[in-house]
Image (tube, rainbow, N blue to C red):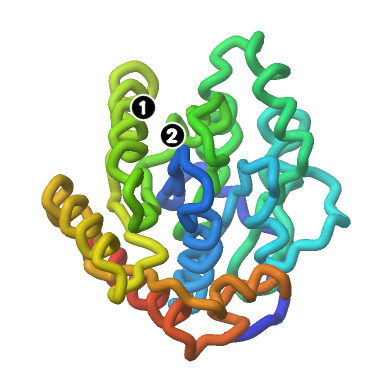
Amino acid sequence: MSLAESEPAARADAGSRGRIVAVANQKGGVGKTTTAVNLATAFAAQGRRVLVVDLDPQANATTGLGVEEAFAATSYELLLGEVELGAAIVGSAVSGLMVVPASPDLAAAEIELSSRARREFLLTQALRGHIGAFDDVLIDCPPSLNLLTVNALTAADRILVPLQCEFYALAGLAQLMGTIERVQRSLNPRLALQGVVLTMYDRRNNLCEQVAADVRGHFGDKVYKTMIPRNIRVSEAPSYGVPVLVYDQRCAGAQAYMQLAAEIRAHE
């Protein structure tokens, strides 16, 4: 896998568009950004053209893909309509993977956008008809069900839910599913659940096994067979500004994300 930076320009093609997937969970610390970054990297390793839209004010996906702070525009300006998509796209540490970076300014977006007409459709307007250069568009959502997340769900074709194998996982997932249903009814009828990814799995922990069984019992084949294990290399990689697939491609976490990407592609 090459660390060469991608070209920051992307072809806008109104005649076709990539698949838009929102990676979302209102609970923090479940591996949401880690999944968005490494799944995008795995898709790029398959030769696909990938765009990550960082919609989280913490900007962890931005830094985790090796994007420095020297960028002219972010997803904040994109939402406000101050720039076109092409002006907000930059290269990453992964060949074939581009990024719309985030900044802490996004934290103020909830207030600034609340008075806008059709405020739930701002990201839709920014993306639709402008992503024909990409096979996959992954939106890394903030860990809350706010206006930023609603914009992502309104713009997306599918939602991918990373779910930590812990006691409170199912309760949080029920809340998220309620939000998805409301968005489907009033904003985006095409939105569908792509799947649930079990993260931070430890087979030595009986609770992890029970949570996994409960989630599979409720969602059936919407839960991917591939589970992302707890892995120290996955935790270390962001501090080096690269995905784990670049940091240590042979580790268990990296291999799991490659398997997940293959499973997602097989389901399609």
Residue 268 visible in rendering? no
Mark 1 element type: helix
Q: Residue at x 45, y 77 (%)?
A: 253
Q: What is the three-letter code of the residue carrying label 2?
A: Leu
Q: Position of residue 22 (x, y in %)?
A: 45, 45
Residue occupying the point 56% across, 80% down: 233
Question: Mark 2 highlights which residue?
Answer: 153
Is 201 drawn above or below residue 134 in the view shown?
below
**Residue 125 visible in rendering:** yes
User: Does the residue at mark 2 contact the one at mark 1 (Cβ under 8 Å)?
Assistant: yes
Judged from this view, the residue extending furthest toward the bottom is 250
Residue at 58% across, 71% down? 235
Q: Label 1 is placed on what type of residue?
A: Thr
Question: In the picture shown, does residue 5 fall above or below 217?
Answer: below
Indicate which label's residue lies in the foreground, 2 or 1.
1
Residue that mark 1 sits on: 179
Q: Quadrant of the N terminus?
A: bottom right
Q: CA distance from mark 2 to mark 1?
A: 9 Å
Q: Give the mark count.
A: 2
Q: Residues within 10 Å of mark 2 (few under 14, many from 20)?
A: many
User: In the picture provided, is 14 more to the left or to the right than 187?
Assistant: right
Specify the label residue 68 is tagged with: none
Quarter of the rendering containing residue 202: bottom left
Q: Quadrant of residue 116?
A: top right
Reading the chain from its start, which is encountered first: label 2 or label 1? 2
Q: Is residue 37 placed above or below 47 in the rendered structure?
A: above
Circle 1 residues within 10 Å: few <14, some 14–19, many ≥20:
some
Quadrant location of the C terminus in the rendered image: bottom left
168 or 34, which lies in front? 168
State the residue in front, 225 or 117: 225
